[in-house]
Image (cartoon, helix red, strand yellow):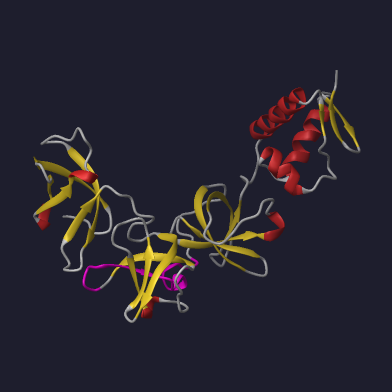
Amino acid sequence: MLQIGQYNQLDVLEVGAYGIILDGLDRGRLLLSNRLAPADIEVGDELEVFVFVDAEGDPVATTDRPAATVGQVAWLEVVEVNEVGAFADWGLSKDLFIPFAEQQHPLGKGRHSLVKVYLDNQGRLAGSTRIDHWIKDEPGNLKRGEKVRVIVGDKTELGYKAIINHQSWGLLYSNELFQRIRKGQEMEAFVNRVRDDGKVDLSLTQPGFSKNKIDGVSGDIIAALEENDGFLPLSDKSPPQEIYARFGISKKVFKQAVGALYKARRITLHSDGVRLKK
């Protein structure tokens, strides 16, 4: 069955002067213009296409890649607002329709918003900014230490809400952030804890560093020292942001690695940094 709002692997039935004909499964034959088709495509090949529907409800195939598929969330720009609703640019020739009923707040042209892509009751693609209606505090099978993809949401008193794998809410705590983040930003994060109430605490650094991982960070510090004439202007008094900017780790992990290097007598500690021991 052809999947509307998703990527489909379809067989090439014909290659003509105006485009190629794809096997649209239960929806018949689909035309893909030559502009969107690979130059070396041949009959019998399989081609991955995204399928949406036109104004008449007929399926349309494209090799363009939208910002999100059905069930996913993306940070989109509103390009038009009229009497029927809003329209957002999601990377396709046809903008994504956002009905008034699916707008958490009135949308304005030129503004950005988190938008969930869904299929309406008539099988047409649409968007919703009522994110809390679709995303819940349900961790599913998430485990501590698991790497996830997140999209940053609204700022709260404790930090930033973040959508985990397009499915559930998590929280990035402000006092554990060592870089600036913004709403709509996509990034990798780690599950720090799944609480008893089902809420998920997130971290930008992997929790529970093992000895092997500390050894890896220690190696990075030694390499940095060797590249800078044996001195690194970072210490346990350095701001967490400086440490993260240099090594992509938390201050806690940096101090653990420095402590291990000091015990191994590979560095000396100073008020303004660390020095490679000769």
On screen, residue 67 versus residue 49, left or right, reads right
The percent position of residue 197, horizontal first and vertical second, equals: 56, 67
Residue 79 sits in quarter? bottom left
Relative to residue 181, is residue 37 depicted above or below?
above
Instruction: Say which quarter of the image contains residue 222.
Output: top right
Q: Which residues are magenta?
A: 121-137
Does residue 209 sit above or below 73 in this rendering? above
Q: Is residue 232 magenta?
A: no
Residue shown at 42% from the left, 76% from the top: 103
Question: Which image quadrant is residue 220 in?
Answer: top right
- Residue pictured at 63% horizontal, 69% vertical: 156
Location of residue 53 in the rendering, given as x and y in whole percent from the top left corner: 21, 62
User: Residue 25: x and y, percent?
Assistant: 12, 52
Residue 24 seen in the figure: no
Is 17 in front, or is 183?
17
**Residue 126 in magenta?**
yes
